[in-house]
Amino acid sequence: MKQARLENLFGWGCTRSGMTLIEGIVAMALLIVIGTGLISIFTASQRLIYHSGSRFASSSLGRMAIESSNQLSVRADTDNCLYNQSKCAGAAISLNGMDYTVNYTTSAVTDPSGAATSLRKVIINVTWNETR
């Protein structure tokens, strides 16, 4: 019945099966908003994957530094990195195109009463710059 009125009103037999310009613009705007959201999600996930890879590499370098370091060898004398902080030399390591810096910090361990013990505490800091 509605179709018959349109034919009589405009004089040509048209049906409303197509999209109007406004409907097309709204559909394109929705696609652009959804596409932009997906692109930002992919970009953020790529950045997080890259950062987690760098963190994993730095933890591996720290573990390697403490396990294989000649500076931290336990000896009878006290003229080494464990007892003299000025003898602790950092290292610059390049891995997978990223530059890491490994630094040592040593200190004495005290018991709960505050008395000094023969134990030493070693802290290894691994730093890097992410350029991506």
Image (tube, helix red, strand yellow):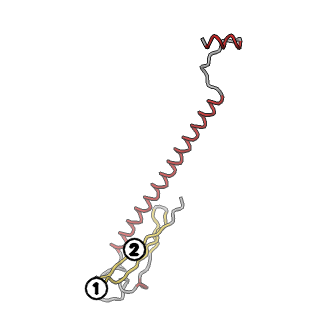
Give the amino acid at mark 1. Answer: Ser
Residue 73's spot in the image, x, y percent? 32, 80
- Please state if 69 lies on the left or on the right of 96 as rendered: left
Rate crowding at label 1 as few (under 14), some (14 to 19) or many (20 or more) other CA atoms within 10 Å. few
- Please state if 77 lies on the left or on the right of 89 as rendered: left
Q: Quadrant of residue 77?
A: bottom left
Earlier along the polypeptide chain: callout 1 or callout 2?
1
Q: What element carries label 2?
A: strand
Rate crowding at label 2 as few (under 14), some (14 to 19) or many (20 or more) other CA atoms within 10 Å. some
- Please state if 43 lies on the left or on the right of 112 as rendered: right
Which is nearer the eye, 70 or 13?
A: 13
Q: Quadrant of residue 71?
A: bottom left
The residue wearing badge 2 is 124
Q: What element carries label 1?
A: loop
Residue 107's spot in the image, x, y percent? 36, 82
Give the amino acid at mark 2. Answer: Ile
Marker count (numbered):
2
Which is nearer the eye, 110 or 6?
A: 6
Which is nearer the eye, 92 or 122?
A: 122
- Please state if 91 lies on the left or on the right of 9 as rendered: left
Residue 82's spot in the image, x, y percent? 35, 83
Q: Quadrant of the N terminus?
A: top right
**Residue at horizontal 65%, vertical 30%?**
22
Q: Reply above or below: 104 against 28.
A: below
**Residue at horizontal 46%, vertical 61%?**
96
The residue wearing badge 1 is 113
Spatial distance from mark 1 to mark 2, Cα to Cα? 26 Å
Check contact, mark 1 vs mark 2: CB within 8 A: no
Instruction: State the mark number for residue 31.
Output: none
**Residue at horizontal 60%, vertical 37%?**
29
**Residue at horizontal 41%, vertical 81%?**
88
